[in-house]
């Protein structure tokens, strides 16, 4: 498409040429009639130039149409004044037709400029409007006051005469100053377009002021260079119309520059009001009062807006609970710091067991804990450190230190966060894991990369239970391994043979007879070999694959249960279930369907749940547990003692077995406190009608101690390691009967 040719240069040159002719005629020839001609021609050309622009360019068309109307009226005013005296019915000092036309200039230019400024001011239009109003009225009031001082005889004339004499200089001066105020208050720097407008109307304003002075002195005639000033405003508008449009500014408004003129205008209005010396025209007082009111309105609006702005900015950057910076503000801070020359270290802190505390003691305690711990962190960190809260229990500290220095800070953080916190009637303690990564000035990292590295280190510190871990390249390899692990696990879930279950016997403490098995998942990875559950169960849960894994384990376990039943050795097999299973309302139904598919009674199955699983959403979990027990499936509470074991809720759970965690059982012979915990737990559980299983028995003394304490069932390497069902060798039943008092009735394993 061919671009339409724009006559920008042509119109601009023509407007300038005719204006220069007006100047030349005034200076050189000094003939009023010639001057009437060029002045009329000059204003007409300016009006035509703006109309041409309206026709040629679509952008800002409405604004320039207003200018064009105003300029046309102004030109028509001169035409009537000079060439149609017959239409000037009223004579000097009254509102003649030429005045009606000429005065059109002001509304046209004011509305046009306002439309142009509207785009520049964006969302701050009301403020700009009030500023513009303040400036216009204050300048007008000031000029009226000055005129009253300077030309008392002018002001003493009848009101309409005074108005018609004064309106031109007052209006055009106010217009020029308010244009300046309008562009300076807007974002970005004003371009050529605005400077042409402001220059044109400023020259015109000086000309009008000179005109007023000459009029008062009775020396004014047409045919001097001054006449050119009367057309300077229209010339400025004609050139501005064709000048390149300023691109919309994205910068923030310049606060000081923006408010300077409105503030000066307000001061001017106050000066006018304070002037008691002369007989001020009522119009000046009114204008000054209006200026004052507009300035007051603007102040109220400004303060309100600014306060909301400050509040919103703070809100957007801080965490409402702790008052620390939030994630977004942290990224901004990192962007700033990573540009600097020195090292920057990001320390990520993740609280351990926070969720358990919150779930069991409630949100109020959880929130208070976070607030107290965040204060402790801020206290430990150096004064130039930035502390932020990234998520529920994850915090970040940015320091200008090397990795080595930051390891010390990490250790200090772990230490203060591990100390007990008192909140209400509770005393709680959570630990923390710390991961950190450093960006050096020489090799600055992107903020997100630094966060990723610190995150990898944090994961590792949690996984390996080391308190502080710094990022190194090997950790990325492991992180990648974790990712491929999940992909591989998906494949394993859909294939046969990779996932299998090992059975570990649970034996009667006194007779050592097998009373059941725990079914434990094993993964034979095609390239990595045997992968232990500790390495993939958590990842499975994070990847949302837990329900599929449980379903698979359930199926494999029921296959073993069916085989045991065929052999006449019906003992229950226990399957571990996790939170996502019990939060799923369809879980109980799926278990029932699996039993039916394998044609097995519910009594062959036991499910092991942990306290933390129950805590994740007690109401929903209890519903599922209720459905399971109604099916006839028995439940065990696993890993008892590792969570925040609250004895009171034991009664509300439909479990009939408690499994004491290995961490207590293993120390029962060496540590008096562990022994006390185990014995009292057994007593309590028996009191509640629950059977007690002790996990992780590795030696005879421990077994003996548990037997003495009245423990019902034992499970551990001493009695049998987890193994494939086919590797179990059962004792000869005949021999078992004969050797009734023989303590060992455990299957021996071939490996
Ligand atoms: P858990 O439920 O507490 O299982 C007992 C763990 O202790 C098993 O580890 C078992 O091999 C180990 N163990 C048993 N006796 C002894 C002992 O005398 N000494 C020592 N040192 N360890 C002993 P495993 O099989 O590695 O499983 C670890 C954890 O993985 C399990 O802890 C359980 O939480 C989870 N897990 C295993 N299989 C499954 C499964 O099919 N589904 C789910 N959701 N979790 C599973
Ligand atoms: Ca278990
Ligand atoms: Ca356990």
Image (tube, grey):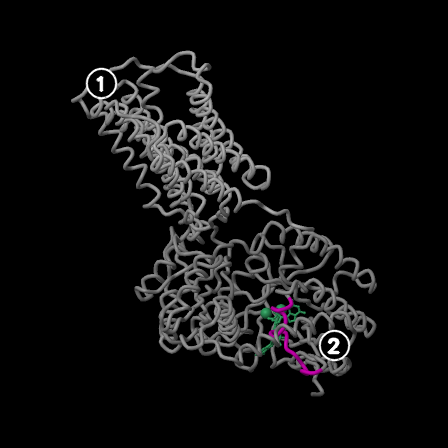
Residue nearer the viewer, 237 or 632: 237
The residue lying toward the viewer, choosing from 550 and 471, is 471
In the picture shown, does residue 690 fall above or below 24? below
Q: Residue under circle 2?
A: 498
- The residue at the point 60 percent across, 81 percent down is 718
Q: In which quadrant is the C terminus drawn?
A: bottom right
Furthest residue to the left? 277
Does 750 appear in magenta? no
Residue 473 place in picture, x, y as percent? 52, 80
Rendered position, 423 above or below 674: above
Q: Residue at x 65, y 80 (%)?
A: 720
Residue 538 lies within the magenta run: yes
Q: Residues within 10 Å of mark 1 (few under 14, many from 20)?
A: few
Pointer 2: residues within 10 angstroms few (<14), some, or many (20+)? some
In this rendering, would 406 be left or right of 445? left
Q: Quadrant of ligand 1?
A: bottom right
Query: Does residue 134 appear in this view?
Result: no
Left/right placement of residue 219 relative to residue 247 reads left
Q: Which is closer to the viewer, label 1 or label 2? A: 1
SS at mark 2 in the image: loop
User: How many angstroms separate mark 1 from mark 2 (CA)?
Assistant: 109 Å
Residue position marked by numbered label 1 in the rendering: 153
Query: Which residues make up the magenta segment?
Result: 527-540
- Depicted 658 relative to depicted 4: above or below: below
Q: Which of the 4 image quadrants contains residue 301?
A: top left
Query: Where is residue 537, by image quadrant?
Result: bottom right
Task: Point out residue 750 in the picture as x, y percentages from the top left corner.
Answer: 71, 87
State if disc 2 and disc 1 touch (CB < 8 Å): no
């Amino acid at each position: 498409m061919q671009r339409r040719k724009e006559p920008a240069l042509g119109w601009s040159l023509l407007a300038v040429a005719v204006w220069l002719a007006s100047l030349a005629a005034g200076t050189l020839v000094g003939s009023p009639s010639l001057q009437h001609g060029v002045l009329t021609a000059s204003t007409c050309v300016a009006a035509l130039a703006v109309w041409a622009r309206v026709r040629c360019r679509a952008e800002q068309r409405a604004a320039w149409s207003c200018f064009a109307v105003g300029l046309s009226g102004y030109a028509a005013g001169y035409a009537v004044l000079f060439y149609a005296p017959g239409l000037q019915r009223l004579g000097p000092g009254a509102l003649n037709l030429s005045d009606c036309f000429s005065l059109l200039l002001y509304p046209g230019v004011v509305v046009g400029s306002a439309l142009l400024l509207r785009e520049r001011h964006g969302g701050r239009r009301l403020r700009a409007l009030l500023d513009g109003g303040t400036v216009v009225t204050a300048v007008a009031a000031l000029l009226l006051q000055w005129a009253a001082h300077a030309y008392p005889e002018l002001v003493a004339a009848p009101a309409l005469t005074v108005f018609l004499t004064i309106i031109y200089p007052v209006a055009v001066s106010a217009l020029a100053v308010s244009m300046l105020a309008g562009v300076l208050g807007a974002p970005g720097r004003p371009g050529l377009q605005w400077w042409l407008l402001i220059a044109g109307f400023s020259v015109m304003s000086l000309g009008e002021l000179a005109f007023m002075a000459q009029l008062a002195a009775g020396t004014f005639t047409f045919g001097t260079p001054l006449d050119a000033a009367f057309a300077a405003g229209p010339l400025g508008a004609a050139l501005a119309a064709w000048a390149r449009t300023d691109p919309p500014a994205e910068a923030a408004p310049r606060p000081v520059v923006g408010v300077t003129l409105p503030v000066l205008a307000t001061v001017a209005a106050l000066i006018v009001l304070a002037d008691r010396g002369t007989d001020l025209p009522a119009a000046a007082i009114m204008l000054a009062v209006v200026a004052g009111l507009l300035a007051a309105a603007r102040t109220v609006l400004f303060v309100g807006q600014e306060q909301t702005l400050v509040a919103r900015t703070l809100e957007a950057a801080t965490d409402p609970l702790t008052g620390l910076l939030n994630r977004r503000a942290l990224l901004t801070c990192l962007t700033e710091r990573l540009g600097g020359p020195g090292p920057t270290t990001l320390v990520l802190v993740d609280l351990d067991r926070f969720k358990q505390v919150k779930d069991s003691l409630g949100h109020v305690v959880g929130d208070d804990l976070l607030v107290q711990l965040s204060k402790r962190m801020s206290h430990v960190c150096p004064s130039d450190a930035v502390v932020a809260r990234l998520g529920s229990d994850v915090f970040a500290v940015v320091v200008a230190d090397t990795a080595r220095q930051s390891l010390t800070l990490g250790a200090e953080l772990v230490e203060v966060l591990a100390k007990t916190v008192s909140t209400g009637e509770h005393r709680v303690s959570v630990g923390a894991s710390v991961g950190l990564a450093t960006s050096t000035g020489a090799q600055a990292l992107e903020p997100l990369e630094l966060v990723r590295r610190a995150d990898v280190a944090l994961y590792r510190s949690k996984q390996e239970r080391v308190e502080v871990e710094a990022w190194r390249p090997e950790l990325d390899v492991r992180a990648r391994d974790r990712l491929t692990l999940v992909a591989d696990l998906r494949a394993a879930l859909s294939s046969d043979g990779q996932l299998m279950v090992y059975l570990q016997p649970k034996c009667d403490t006194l007779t050592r007879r097998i009373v059941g098995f725990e079914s434990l998942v094993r993964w034979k990875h095609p390239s990595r070999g045997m992968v232990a559950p500790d390495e993939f169960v958590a990842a499975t849960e994070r990847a949302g694959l837990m329900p599929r894994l449980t379903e698979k384990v359930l199926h494999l376990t029921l296959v073993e249960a069916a085989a045991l039943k065929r052999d006449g050795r019906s003992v229950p097999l226990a399957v571990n279930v996790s939170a996502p299973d019990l939060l799923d309302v369809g879980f109980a139904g799926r278990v029932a369907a699996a039993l039916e598919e394998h044609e097995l009674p519910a009594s062959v199955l036991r499910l092991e749940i942990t306290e933390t699983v129950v805590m994740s959403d007690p109401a929903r979990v209890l519903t599922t547990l209720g459905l399971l027990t109604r099916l006839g499936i028995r439940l065990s509470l696993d890993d008892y003692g590792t969570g925040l074991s609250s004895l009171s809720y034991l009664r509300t759970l439909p479990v009939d077995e408690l499994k004491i965690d290995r961490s207590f059982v293993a120390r029962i012979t060496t540590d008096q406190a562990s022994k006390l915990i185990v014995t009292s737990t057994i007593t309590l559980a028996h009191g509640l009608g629950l059977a007690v299983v002790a996990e992780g028995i590795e030696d005879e003394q421990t077994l003996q101690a548990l037997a003495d304490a009245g423990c019902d069932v034992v499970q551990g390497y001493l009695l049998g390691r987890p193994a494939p069902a086919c590797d179990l060798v059962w004792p000869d039943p005949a021999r078992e009967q004969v050797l009734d008092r023989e303590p060992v009735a455990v299957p021996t394993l071939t490996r």
